[in-house]
Amino acid sequence: MRERLVAYAKRRWAEGVSNKALAIELGVNRHTLSYWRACLNGLTVARKTSPLKRVEVVVPGRQRTLTLRGPHGVRVDELTLDDVAELLRKLS
């Protein structure tokens, strides 16, 4: 379907129709249409979306602990940010 829309859009662009007018005509977002046009002109390359990444919501003011993992399986749990900073100072 997208290929057919892009082929139609190419004809309309050649006729001088603006992206905004064409987006309304096709019922697509004008930014999407601009992206398709940029891809056609070699200005950008369609890319795969990145996988979702796990995030943690942190409440400000709450002390949280960190886990330090090192090479060869070294693991230290329950460190505060101050503990990690002190450890890095000592190891430097």
Image (cartoon, rainbow, N blue to C red):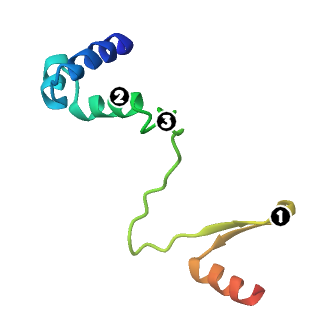
* In this view, 59 is above or below 56: below
Disc 1 to disc 2, C-alpha distance: 45 Å
Compared across the picture, whether 72 is left or right of 18 comes to right
Q: Which of 38 and 33 is in front in this view?
A: 38
Give the image quarter of residue 43: top left
Residue 37 tag number = none
Q: Nearer the viewer, mark 2 or mark 3?
A: 2
Q: Nearer the viewer, residue 61 or 22?
A: 22
Q: Nearer the viewer, mark 3 or mark 1?
A: 3
Q: In which quarter of the image is the N terminus?
A: top left
Disc 3 to disc 1, C-alpha distance: 31 Å
Residue at image mark 1 = 71
Please report contact status of discs 1 and 2: CB closer than 8 Å, yes or no: no
At label 3, the amino acid type is Thr
Residue at image mark 2 = 36
* In this view, 85 is above or below 64: below
**Count of picture labels:** 3
> Neighbour class for label 2 at 10 Å: few (<14), some, many (≥20)?
many
At label 2, the amino acid type is Trp
* In this view, 69 is above or below 25: below
Which residue: 39% across, 75% down?
61
Q: Is mark 2 on a helix, strand or loop?
A: helix
